[in-house]
Image (cartoon, rainbow, N blue to C red):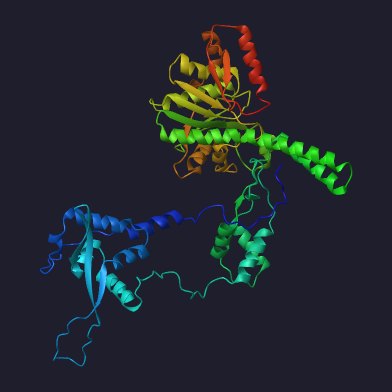
Amino acid sequence: MADENDAPVLTDRPKKRKSVGRQRDIAKKARVSNHVLGEDCNCSRFQCFQATTDEERQALINVFNALESKDSQNSFLSTLIKVESVARRRPRHELEDRAKPKDRSYAYIVKVQREGGAKSVPVCLKGFCAMFGITHRRVRTIQTALKETGFPPQDRRGKHQNRPSKLSGEQVERVIAHIQSFKGRSSHYSRNKSKRIYLPDELNITKMFELFQQQHPAETLSYESYRVIFNNRFNISFGFPRSDTCSLCDQINAKLTCLDSKLQSGSGETAALEQERAQVNTEKEIHHRKAEVFYERKKAARVKSSQDPTTLAVAFDYQKELPLPNKTTNDIFYRRQLSVHSFNIHELAGENVFIYVYNETVAKRGSDDVASLLHHFFSNYVPAEVKHLELFSDGCAGQNKNWTIVRFLFAQVHFWKRFETIKWSFPVRGHSYMECDRDLSMVNKRRQAETQQHWVEEFQSARKRPSPFNTIEMGQGDFFSYTDEAKYKDLQVLKKFCDPQNAVYYDSLPHDGQIADDLHQDLSESDEDGTNS
């Protein structure tokens, strides 16, 4: 059971990266590596562009652009600049008083690969700048650093300490203490201790900042500073984790709480209580390991689907019924409302989401309806090159985990030859959070809706990135009775065998009622233990 009194804690791994962190890194890399070759210097002394070939100059600019930072580039350039004392001074009779004679002279080289080794080729300043796509000013900066310190210059941008608007330590501590004063819940879905805390969905950063201002009216802290501390120092999300927690997890946690209280009070034999507590912890560990098998298998399917165009991995589930009309008028609660059904199919690799929408006058939410919606998806949105299908759904017997759907999928492989293999995985009961649930959380279920089209518009506008939801309205002609079709075709799934991960594969055998009965019993028992496919 999720703890309702968990307080946010500081963490080195916050909820997410900075909102534009990746874009900023890409822009920085582009600035460092966007140097291009300049024009011919037309040097008569060294004949720089005649002394080097086009391939050699391109290799030089490629090596220079491959360096990761400006400091690395400056270090590379400094090895190609030679600092010497002035060997000869020419007399200057005019303007001699205002003349500033140079105390150093500089020579430039480039190193090219020739005859199996590196060869130094002298070039002029203009040719040096052209070959590396840099300005004379940058060369002068390197010259000054080499002359004064003997080392290449270091990039000092952003390293100054003149920050008059920087938050004081006391201000930061006040913000941290305020955020930690909120109580939230942690998730129970992983056997590993999660540091993420979920605050009530009525809260958001803006409301929390307003409460902070009420508590500290004299504080001159901006909303942006509060938001930065919230995102970079805490791992917090809004919206409590699912309330339909696993019954076995709740039972185990209740046992552990009872045993801990007995151990603290000293009632009973300590050794026996410790042994019982260890057994309960072992049971909890095994249960969570079984639950993780489903998520590990789903992750592997996502990776495989993204790499292999002949494989498709999808998760599907019905979403919460939406009422029509959806109004706050009191009379609504005394009237019969029309239910709108929505069936979600989420492609794991491409993040494409297909939402089928229809109301209760069109069809229900049974196994025939699920089979009809899957058939529509297979026929219209699955590319013909896909031959291997991996399905992930909960184990609801009335909708998914039943003979109608099994026979429908069996027919997809053996009768209609649409796929070569279909693998179907179910989670442990109570640990069935999937991408479909995340999609549903984006939909504003409090929207004022009077017609089904209003809910369709809500689905279409619920997500912008990476792409909007694909919303399909279904009619009565799109639904079929696959239960009767399976009986007519006498489709029988007669054998199962398991791999080490409890994945179940099906094959066809000559009709044998005893084998079919045994399989039916196995499917019924699998609802109560482990992860099944």
Q: In this rendering, does residue 150 appear at all?
A: yes
Horizontal and vertical percent position of residue 122: 18, 66
Relative depth, front residue between 411 and 303: 303
Quadrant showing the C terminus = top right
Q: On the image, which quarter does residue 446 sit in?
A: top right
Horizontal and vertical percent position of residue 500: 58, 26
Horizontal and vertical percent position of residue 178: 66, 62
Horizontal and vertical percent position of residue 506: 54, 17
Residue occupying the point 45% across, 70% down: 159
Which residue is farthest right? 267
Relative depth, front residue between 343 and 328: 343
Q: On the image, which quarter does residue 168 sit in?
A: bottom right
Relative depth, front residue between 86 and 394: 86
* Side of 506 relative to 142 (left or right): right
Above or below residue 91? Residue 425 is: above
Residue occupying the point 31% across, 73% down: 141
Q: On the image, which quarter does residue 496 sit in?
A: top right
Relative depth, front residue between 255 and 351: 255
Above or below residue 402? Residue 512 is: above
